[in-house]
Image (cartoon, rainbow, N blue to C red):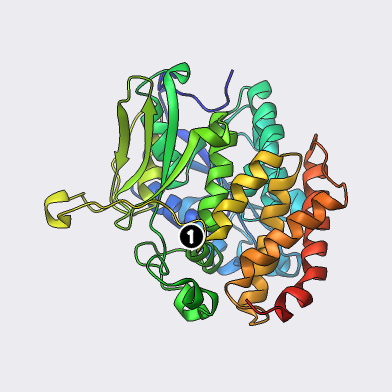
Amino acid sequence: MSAVPLKNDKPVEAGVRTVTVLGATGSIGDSTMDLLRGARGRYRVEALTANSNVEGLVKLAREFDARFVAVADASRFDELKNALAGTGIECGVGESAIIEAASRPADWLMAAVSGAAGLKPALAAVDRGTTIALANKECLVCAGDFFMQRAAKAGACILPADSEHNALFQALSSGNRDELTRVIITASGGPFRTWAAADIENATLAQALKHPNWSMGRKITIDSASMMNKGLEVIEAACLFALEPEEIDVLVHPQSIVHGMVEFSDRSVVAQLGTPDMRTPIAHCLGWPERIAGPAVKLDLASIGQLTFEAPDFARFPALRLAYDALRTGQGATTVYNAANEIAVAAFIAEKIRFGAIARLVEATMNGWVRAGNLAPLASADDAIAVDHNARNMAASLLPQIAAKAS
């Protein structure tokens, strides 16, 4: 049985639903809290977590009367505890406290802790067999097969919170799994969609951060510019919906109105559309199997005028090709892909490498990993975290020679 429900046949439970938000002060967390703010009678907050934003966490904890809050940064614990003194809100610190937050009895959990740090807390929620809105890419990119198998075994319900995967989730309900022929993930093309390869190579940080449609964090915006983010989404889709690489296509769609499509055996193609606002897919997850009112701007196709589509250019955006390579290689290769990219993006932000070198460092790390005979199945969170750690070290060691090479 899949951990991702392909039909909305879950019985609706009456009463107030308890929720936990891991990563409550980030961009996904902010959108989630905004939705909760608009539906106070339906939800009660059990736990909230943040990495180091104590001020934002305290504000949310007081506003929503959370029962438990946790901060990952140990140096901020006294500040958190003092700010909530006398409220009756329990406080925790460090990885164990984030895991405790995920383990507490909530009907629904938003997993929005970024990076490999989000894996163990998400697994703690999985083991409770609860409903999880998944916005942490690393859970699937670093440990996808293991994560989904464990979710299915525990009876956990995984709801995709990313706009593209949520679109596929909604479209898949129009047919049965054995009727599916392919899924199509759309990509805006980012700020460099029409740029020549030489210009992309030397793009500046400021240029990479000018996304034409979405307002996101710095890391994901840079990933969108390189199309690395779309590569990560291809890997996620394969894990979420048990797809082969050949069943996943990417289509560049500059307007970001069509978020995903599913083609069935009769050649019907079902699409999900909406204005580019993360509150729409999150609202779908929060209300599922029903729908709740969302605050996103109403879609007005007449004013948009036209929707256009293009094939992706694997030559100008090699990060997308590398994702398919990693998916076909398996045995930890997708973990290496993600880890090397994190090192590469950090190096680009620090002006140690050119923008074009991001994909080259990822490819060099993947090739080095395979040549060293490091490929092996991942059977636990510790396996995935170890591969992530070692791949980062390898990418860091390759960084000087990649930086020195001319394009």
- Amino acid under label 1? Ser
Q: Secondary structure at mark 1?
A: helix
Q: Residue furthest left?
A: 302
Viewer can see residue 244: yes
Q: Position of residue 68 (x, y in %)?
A: 62, 48
Residue 143 vertical position relative to residue 2 in the rendered view, above or below: below
Residue 254 relative to residue 105: left or right: left
- Residue 108 rendering spot, x and y as whole percentages: 52, 35
Return the residue nearer the eye: 346 or 330: 330
In this view, 267 is above or below 132: above
How many circles with numbers are drawn on the protein? Answer: 1
Residue 24 visible? The answer is no
* Classed neighbour count for the residue bearing mark 1: other residues with Cα under 10 Å, few (<14), some (14–19), many (≥20): some
Q: Hey, which quadrant is residue 110 in on the image?
A: top right
Q: Residue at x 31, y 31 (%)?
A: 270
Q: Left or right: 269 with respect to 368?
A: left
Q: Quadrant of the C terminus?
A: bottom right
What is the quadrant of the N terminus in the image? top right
Residue under label 1: 27
Q: Nearer the viewer, residue 327 or 232?
A: 327
Q: Position of residue 342 (x, y in %)?
A: 67, 63
At 48% from the left and 60% from the top, the residue drawn is 27
* Residue nearest the observer in this picture, 334 or 79: 334
Residue 5 sits above or below residue 205 on the image: above
Q: Residue at x 66, y 39 (%)?
A: 328
Percent x, y for residue 292? Answer: 32, 37
Could you tell whether 255 is left or right of 70 in the image? left
